[in-house]
Image: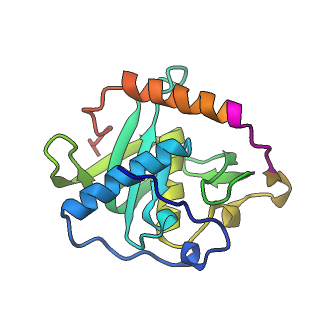
């Protein structure tokens, strides 16, 4: 696996629509592995192909479980994702690995159903799935699907006054990286999420 460069706001590719994935081969599987590694290294929970310069409709998501909210963890690599159902609404702060150091309030649907081709990590095969996601996981899917359509979260900020710079703390980032790794290790990786739509 390799850590890829995450492109930043100002790169014209982030404003372009990504192409549909049509070839599901060993190179795509390697890309998935590299995207996960890159996302984990950056302390992220979602990453779109365009963010690493790959103009294809592919995302990886790994949302840790939230016991306080009663939500299971969700790890999935999804090609050609399409949000087919949305309901509810919630406005919360959002950031992005391609807009480092900035956070702003964004309104998103509370619940989504996403369909696409998911990688079965045991068999290495791709299969069509429908994934139900709630709250934070739903937000991550919406954010990553926006990337595939050339939209950054900053264009969805509900009130520009909420967009603000946050200071980076390397020591705290390492703590977060370790906490996320521990959560991933404790989560059952067999489940693709709630695929009953």
Picture quadrant of residue 194: top left
Residue bounds of the magenta highlight: 165-171
Q: Between 34 and 164, which is closer to the camera in this rendering?
A: 34
Query: Who's the residue at 48% across and 54% down the image?
Result: 47
Query: Who's the residue at 66% across and 50% down the image?
Result: 95
Judge from the rendering whether residue 191 lies leftward or rightward of residue 61; answer left or right: left
- Point out residue 99 in the picture as x, y percentages from the top left corner: 67, 59
- Point out residue 56 in the picture as x, y percentages from the top left corner: 37, 71
- Point out residue 4 in the picture as x, y percentages from the top left corner: 47, 58
Picture quadrant of residue 59: bottom left
Judge from the rendering whether residue 58 lies leftward or rightward of residue 47; answer left or right: left
Q: Is residue 77 visible?
A: yes
Q: Between 95 and 141, which is closer to the camera in this rendering?
A: 95
Query: Who's the residue at 20% across and 46% down the image?
Result: 120
Q: Is residue 116 visible?
A: no
Q: Between 30 and 65, which is closer to the camera in this rendering?
A: 30
Query: Who's the residue at 46% across and 24% down the image?
Result: 182
- Point out residue 128 in the picture as x, y percentages from the top left corner: 21, 56
Q: Between 92 and 47, which is closer to the camera in this rendering?
A: 47
The reply to whether the magenta stretch includes residue 131 is no
Indicate how the structure is coloured in the image: rainbow
136 in relation to 8, above or below:
above
Number of numbered discs: 0
162 in relation to 177, above or below:
below
Q: Residue furthest right?
A: 161
Judge from the rendering whether residue 55 lies leftward or rightward of residue 94; answer left or right: left
């Amino acid at each position: 696996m390799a850590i890829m460069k995450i492109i930043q706001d100002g790169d014209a590719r982030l404003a372009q629509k990504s192409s549909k994935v049509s070839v599901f081969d060993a190179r795509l599987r390697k890309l998935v592995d590299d995207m996960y590694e890159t996302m984990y290294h950056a302390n992220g929970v979602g990453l779109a192909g365009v963010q690493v310069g790959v103009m294809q409709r592919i995302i990886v998501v790994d949302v840790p479980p939230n016991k306080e909210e009663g939500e299971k963890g969700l790890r999935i690599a999804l090609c050609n994702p399409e949000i087919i159902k949305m309901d509810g609404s919630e406005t919360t702060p959002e950031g992005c690995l391609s807009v480092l150091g900035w956070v702003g309030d964004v309104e998103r649907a509370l619940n989504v159903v996403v369909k696409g081709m998911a990688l079965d990590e045991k068999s290495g095969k791709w299969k069509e799935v429908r994934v139900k996601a709630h709250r934070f996981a739903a937000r991550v899917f919406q954010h990553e699907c926006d990337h595939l359509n050339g939209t950054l979260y900053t264009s969805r900020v509900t009130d520009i006054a909420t967009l603000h710079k946050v200071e980076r703390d390397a020591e705290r980032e390492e703590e977060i990286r370790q906490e996320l790794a521990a959560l991933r290790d404790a989560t059952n990786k067999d489940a693709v999420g709630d695929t009953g739509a």
